Amino acid sequence: MTQAGNIPQRRPLSRIGAFVAERRGLVRDYLSAISGTGGRLVFSLAYFIALANTLSIAEFGMFATASAAGVMLSRILAFGFISALYRTATIRPNLIGTFTAGFLLLAVISLPLLAAASYGVYLVFFAGTVPLPVFVAIVFAEALLWRPVEVALIVNNGLGKFGRAALLTIMATALRALGAVLFMFAAQPTIGVWSWYYIGANVASLVIAFGFFYPRQRLRLRLELYLRRLADSIYVAGAEVLFYLQMEFDKLLVLAIGGPHLAGIYAIIMRLVDLTAIPIRTFSMMLVQRIMRAPELLSRLSVKSGIEGGVFLVSTLALAALAIVLHFFPNALGRNVAEAAPLVALAICVPGLRNLVEYQAELLFARGQTLVRAINLALLAGLKAVLLTYALTTILDIPDLVLSLNIVFLLLYLASALLTYSAMRKPAKAI
């Protein structure tokens, strides 16, 4: 009886032990990756506080908007071939050297297109508000210095070296924060002077990334491999440009319609919203890798809804905590941020909805549905432009404008969910 009575107890215990053992590596990888997220969050906050309170609100708005445009334009570099490099690192790491050579070749070829697109964006959104040399310096820092650093991060994450990627993330973000702190003591703390500090910080990050963190493999050109993946890479590049246009178009519109000061206040609020996305992106990155290997992972509705609910809850609680701190201590993040502090709580749903749109776009990338992803993002970018233009031109009171963003991002989320999950009914594309 004793032996028979022990059998039902052993089986659940053995199952629990097996469950933990199978996922020990996953938990270890996530903790390694999230450590980089924590370090990035701390240094990103220090960077934001130093910069937002050194530049005037108007100049901070100009920099934040130009930086957002630079991030968007940086996706043109190498025609999106970074996606092929990431897939290679995840699935066929022995070909990293070959695909790195392809990335470098395509990066050089893409430079004229990058320059032309940058000048076009400047003429449409920045002429008359941001000096051209300053805009060029910021786009140069984002597209030709920081984007290659992201390549090193992407490759290390693809290889499963989350600890190394986390360390590089912390060091690169710390260098930006150091640049912002040094800028506080500049004789002329203007956006023009800051652009040189920004370039210096990104140069240092680039040297460290490729000097110490990039895998050592011989570079070999194999054009036939690149040509087979070029169409998919171009879809990804287009989707990435549209993704960041959809994500950052609000800043461009606020600058163009509302002027630099309103753009500065808006940029402060959205930068605080961005900080809530940092932990979510680590989770999304690891989920994308799992889906690449097992596309059926999200086949159940309960799993989909559970993940989306978690993303929304974590994002909302993060901004709510920040809003509470700023309510009682409005000068906690500096005197310039204090002007926008009462508005933060009004955007309470924006982080969760915004992060969910970003997460859904990553799902289609993970499944290889890059063309559908590009089309969806184009539709969302157009919808966002219409909604925000209407809000900016009809709502003159700033608190009401910030409050209306919850409706704008809710409509964007609903459109994104409809487009994304309709596309996911089709089979995943083989990689």
Image (spheres, rainbow, N blue to C red):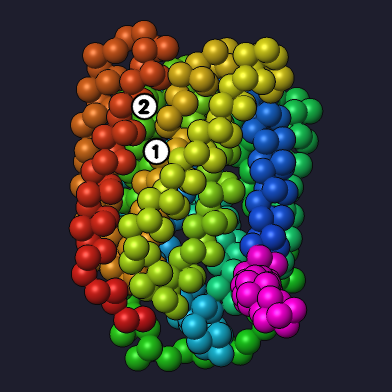
User: Given contact means CB atoms under 8 Å apart, are the residues at marks 2 and 1 in contact?
Assistant: yes
Residue 108 horizontal/vertical position (percent): 44, 70
Sequence-earlier tag: 2 or 1: 1
Q: Is residue 397 above or below residue 105?
A: above
Give the extent of the magenta segment. 1-29
| Residue occupying the point 57% across, 56% down | 282
Q: Secondary structure at mark 1?
A: helix
Q: Residue furthest top?
A: 397
Residue identifier under label 2: 406
Amino acid at circle 1: Leu
Q: Is residue 153 above or below residue 63?
A: below
Dot 2, how many residues are within 10 Å of its Cα: few (below 14), some (14-19), or many (20+)? many
- State the image coordinates of residue 175 (x, y, percent, origin top left): 73, 48
Q: Which numbered tag is attached to residue 353?
A: 1
Q: Is 22 covered by the magenta stretch? A: yes
- In the rendered structure, the answer to whether residue 292 lies left or right of residue 44 reads left
Is residue 210 visible in the rendered structure shown here? no
